[in-house]
Amino acid sequence: MITARFLGPRVVWLAIALLAAAVLVPLSNLWLPAGHALRIPDYMMPLLGKYLAYAILALALDLVWGYVGILSLGHGAFFALGGYAMGMYLMRQIGSRGTYGNAVLPDFMVFLNYKELPWFWLGFDQFWFAALMVVLVPGLLAFLFGYFAFRSRVTGVYLSIITQAMTYALLLAFFRNDMGFGGNNGLTDFKEILGFPIQAGTTRAGLFAATAVILAGFVLMVGAITRSKLGLLMVAVRDAESRTRFLGWRAEHVKLFAFTLSAVMAGVAGALYVPQVGIINPGEFAPLNSIEVVVWTAVGGRGTILGPVIGALLVNGGKSYFTAAAPEAWLFILGGLFVVVTLFLPRGIVGTIDHGWSALGDRRRAARAEKGADETGVVTPVANPAE
């Protein structure tokens, strides 16, 4: 009860639902016989895991956009960097089982006549090192980028543009074969992770469970941050940055903390995404991918924690359906969805429901106060829910 009061019941219930899914979905896939009505098919396990990884990415964006007011159009870059760090580890695990049988060099390096492993690939044969890079590389890039941007007080659309320029620059860089990351083809043909065959059903189920547990952990973490004094300060920076500075707070420090933490979350999402889809290439840096994350968050409702998770699941579920049923129409549907949400549901799904529920409560309280005034002749003041 203390936890629910501190984090909010919605956050606690969302975390419980994710932890339950981490157990029940894999059990459904592994234990129930084929053809059972409640069995999750094999092909759905990596697909659902991918959706949950996207939900982590949307939650990461919500931390900076919904609570600090930073509209980043470059979070796909942090996602892709985390994915490449995990992909490098998975490539090192292939060893001599590759097409060219080289125990040290990945196949694309053999094909491109590399003589030795580049220095920045060293250490990626160890999972702990790769996990450290998943966190460190996106976090360091975000810290350096944010330090100069926020210190210069770049805000609004200008900040959004330079975040998109950052991810586009990385897209062009990673397309080059001489960068040492596989060029246009990227990294693929993974064999195993932590010694387990990556295509095995139990491994797929384990990856889904890990993604659900990590998402639940991030939900609780973001819930704790946003309901703390730091969270109140983040909202103050979002709503009245100049007044916050006038009161003596360093708004750039608040922004830098949130932006760096958000990038780390996005990197973890990318690392969970790669072994479940089986590939990472420069296309993940595409600016359109970062814009899609904004759409997921806007559809679900920014600044709500629950909203980005719902938005990521709904929009990507729709994408999977429409790209198969009407692939030529999907981009029009996505653009139309963003326009409709902007014009008619500016608070998103969860925000609109919250606003409607609050308005209904206000009307009920007003009706009870009016009824009390009619019976007693004394008007009972109605409490302001914002106080």
Image (spheres, rainbow, N blue to C red):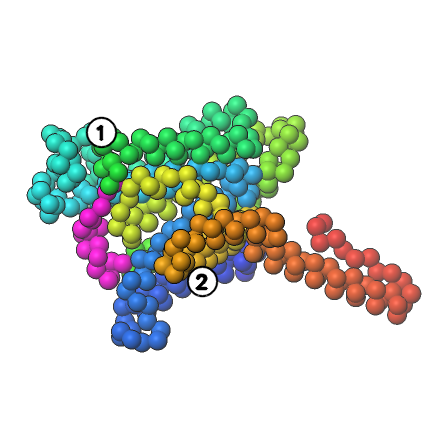
Q: Which mark is residue 264?
A: none
Other residues around mark 1 within 10 Å, as few (<14) / some (14–19) / many (≥20): few
**Residue at 8%, 43% in the rendered image:** 101
Q: Which residue was labeled with disc 2? A: 17
**Residue at 29%, 62% in the rendered image:** 43
Q: In this view, does 253 lie above or below 295?
A: above
Residue 111 in the image: state x and y as whole percent: 13, 36
Report the residue that reaches farthest toward the right: 377
In the image, 191 versus 340, the foreground residue is 340
Q: Which amino acid does label 1 sit on?
A: Asp
Q: In which quarter of the image is residue 134?
A: top left
In the image, 66 versus 326, the foreground residue is 326
> Which quadrant is the N terminus positioned in?
bottom right
In magenta segment, residue 196: yes
Res. 109 in view: yes
Q: Which residue was labeled with disc 1? A: 178
In the picture, measured across the screen, residue 384 lies left or right of residue 59, that is right
Q: In this view, does 36 lie above or below 228?
A: below
**Residue at 19%, 51% in the rendered image:** 192
Q: Mark 1: which secondary structure? A: helix
Residue 341 in the image: state x and y as whole percent: 57, 51
Q: Magenta residues, as a range?
A: 186-204
Residue 282 in the image: state x and y as whole percent: 31, 39
Q: What residue type is labelled 2?
A: Ala
**Residue at 91%, 65% in the rendered image:** 377
